[in-house]
Image (cartoon, coloured by chain):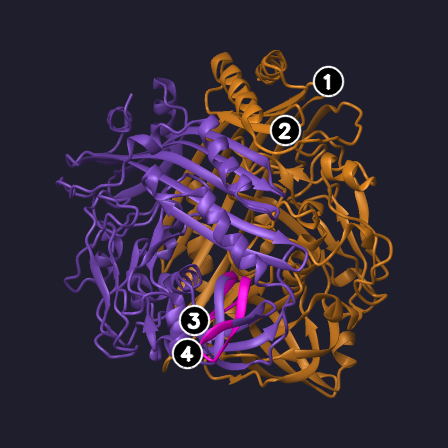
Amino acid sequence: VTALELAERALQAADGDEALALVQTERSGMARFAGSEVHQPTLIENEVVELQVARDGRVGIASGNRTDDEGLRELASRAREAADSAPAADDFPGLTPPSTPPAVEGFDEEAAALGAEEQARLAAAAIEASDLDLYGFFTSGVTGVAIAATTGLSVSQELTDVAVLALAAVEGASGYAEQTGWRAADVDPAGAARVAVDKASRTRGAAELEPGAYAAVLEAPAFAELLAYFSYDAFGALGVIEERSYSFDKLGQQVFDERFSLADDALDPRGLPKAFDFEGTPKQRVQLVEDGVLTGVVWDRASAKRAGDGHQTTGHAPPSSIRHWGPLPFALSVAGGEADSPDQLAEAVGDGIYVTRLHYLSVVDPREGIVTGMTRDGTFRIRGGKVADPLVNLRFTVSVPQLLAELPGLTREPVLVNQNAYYDERYPTGLLSPAIATARLDVTGTGSTPGI
Amino acid sequence: VRELSEQAVAAALGAGASYADARVVVRRAQVVGTRNGRVERLDDTETEGIGVRVLVRGAWGFACDRRLDAAGAEAAAARAVEFARAAPGGHRRELAPLEPAQGEFRTRLERDPLAVPVADKVALCLRAEEALLHEDVKVTAAVVRAQREHKVFASSEGAAFEQELVECGGGIDALAARDGVTQIRSYPSAHGGSSAQAGWEYVEGLGLEREAPRVGEQAAALLRADPCPSGITTVVIDAEQMELQVHESVGHPTELDRVYGTEAAYAGTSFLKPQDLGSLRYGSEHMNITADSTTPGGLGTFAFDDEGVAASREPVVREGILSGFLTSRETAARIGSGAGGSMRADSWSRMPLVRMTNLHLEPGEGSLEELIAGVDEGVFLQTNKSWSIDDKRLNFQFGTQVAWEIRDGRLGRMLRDATYTGQTPIFWGSLDGVAGPEEWRLHGLTNCGKGQPGQHAHVSHGTSPARFRNVQVGFKS
């Protein structure tokens, strides 16, 4: 039974004036390792049906993973009860009309065929390439998403994703590398491990650093994570409507360095392509920042209806479990610059700090775009334009707009950075980012040394 | 269902496992959320399946199947064994010895929260929201949740038990905005409120409607408050923020799997070493931390954890000295101390990990007012707003929704945008007072993340307000 067939069966079981069935399927394996041995190997097979029904203008949602006829009847009953218990929803935008989603890539037969033995073998390839203890995982999965609605909407997609995370670490030294993609050939576990080992070998003897404002180079994983935390508040329409977003009163203004352009583009085959969102709306590329000017935010049907000023969905509805966040940019893509490598960015910086990876970010003030967090697994001084002596992990508390206000350079080729922590149902997301040089990263404290 | 779990264990042993356990889990969860007077979430989720964990030649394997029938149980067992056989590494594992767990456990409750009509939940949220309204409040939100989890466990060592855990909770938020400033106030906690393992009487007891006018007014008042000045000063931290302080700077670093490095790639490790047990000074003599999976109402309360170890109450820090770790059977055997008891899995589709159960800061003496009275100059910090801590759990920075100036032992003006930062053992070393049992509250959070694939744990912390000297306050970029 395909995901779309299951969605159609759930729709037939539904009891409402209108209904929409969303099916998510997962077949995945993760060989997680620590100290160079697999210690948390997890194989998952699941299929989840979510049924949304509207009855007399009232809307309810139920979900479950019993997909036999009795399970679907019971699901329909819970969805009906939820709808009947709700007050009339005068802001309900209605269900998505039928449309033809764009053709996208994102499925690889070779990745889909990876089973437990191959997943373990690819984890072993990383482990064997490291002469330091290795921590991380290899994972691959096949995700199915299908939506059918009484409007005639009927869309489905199968996605594959593969990822390797390599942390080479011993007492007092650690280095990090990651690779992700939708093709099996997109990742080279041994190569990632070698990068992590090289990075780790340069972190021994890390020194402290006085707090202050420093010029900095952020490798793609570091910048991607910082940008993601900023963007969920800054580039979703709900935050603008509710006056809590950095973008609230700045759309159309030049607020960042003109070298900085940002889009949300789930159609880009360099990312993890998606054809439609969780309402079934076709995905659109949305330019968020053009040459430093804030140009747009992403929308879903609910936020567009609420704004009521002619806005249309851009295909950015999130899963129902996080609907209260509003529409989200899950496929951010930063335009590349002109530098060949992060080392060339270090030359542009001259004197500053070099950051590989960030840890435990938190938004301190969404309206001002202030984010705090730590660096880890490869923080260095830049001296004389060269990546030099290692530093302990640094606390930063930065205004992201200030950090983006002066960018001496970006690397030419963005790389795909994994954004999936694999909570709940698997839904691969990633961010295309170059490494960047910034004139200002505010270091506000020091923390632990690198390593275990 | 019990037969299914035993069938899975038998299948795993038949396929070559030296140890196997199986958990059948059926969970129903309901969330009702309203925002600005409209229903935003009205979700009813059910999920069920079986997870099988095996040891084959010292290597772990885990696989799961959503089908609760013989085919699903046997398929999960076979795949778990297959994955364990393929796992690279030189595996040697021992598990702390254990009497096979037997029995049943059910949450004590007066009113089943899933039996409360959804319409009543919607009405409660809307009433609470209405009471939050204020001229400058742009967003009002209320949420209530309920969950029932039925778990059946069997192991190849003869354990067989069944547990039904019921929890519920709720919270409200008011977000105010004016002239480029945005501020939020929440009750009883930020980030989705507070939950307990209890019946609907817990949600009714929160008094969401009663507290809402104060919450709305404070959100609006924060727009006109001065920013919290930077400096090194004395802080008194309310019980709710102390919940997160305990969670992040004591709970996670004392998880023994982190100490041994198995979370290094994601959540991080710990500044603690195994040899620190019994000797490391974690904080001042006022610091007493207890892990207690028997606490009535705790989200981490059970009869047995997810590998069959009986619930217990154990010291983690006693008078400032590290006295215990949170352990699994594997890590307990490795350190040669304890028997485990902290293994918990997010669902049938996840492998159990060392997690907090209920981790408490034991009360001291006196009232919150007495703590404040002992401060010449400082700030009183209330309700979490932002949180971050490094991968070894040393450097932390928290922001709170509101702060109050303290001068000459009395609360003064309201302050906004307060943050405080420190290094874990230095900060806890500056603890010079914890309020008494009358101020002690149990808080339940449902968003503790760890593991790959990711898992959310539901954890409770009992805390009283506490006072710390010489704390860096007020960093903002």
In the rendered structure, are the residues bearing label 3 and label 4 in contact, judged by CB atoms less than 8 Å apart? Answer: yes
The magenta span reads A358-387
Q: Residue at x 43, y 41 (%)?
A: B118
Tell me which secondary structure the magenta stretch mostly adopts: strand
Q: Secondary structure at mark 3?
A: strand
Chain label for disc 3: A
Dot 1: what SS? loop
Whether residue B50 is visible to the viewer of this picture, yes or no, is yes
| Mark carried by residue B343 | none
Numbered label attached to residue A349: 4
Disc 4 vs disc 1: Cβ atoms closer than 8 Å? no
User: What amino acid is found at the position of numbered circle 3 in the picture?
Assistant: Val
Measuring from the top left, give residue A158's x and y in whole percent.
28, 34
Image-quadrant location for residue B44: top left
The spot of residue A128 in percent (x, y) is: 54, 39
Whether labels 2 and 4 share one chain? no
Q: Which residue is mark 3?
A: A217
> Badge 1 is on which residue?
B158
Quadrant into which the N terminus of chain A falls: top left
**Residue B249, how many percent across, how many down?**
68, 60
Let me know if residue A362 is in the magenta part. yes
Tell me the colour chain A is drawn in. Answer: purple
Which chain is orange in the picture?
B
Going by the numbered disc 1, the residue's amino acid type is Gly
Mark-to-mark CA distance, 3 and 1? 57 Å
Is the C terminus of chain A in the top left, top right, bottom left or bottom right quadrant? bottom right
Chain under label 4?
Answer: A
Queried whether the magenta region covers residue B458, the answer comes back as no
Q: Is residue B305 left or right of residue B415?
A: right
Q: Nearer the viewer, mark 3 or mark 1?
A: 3
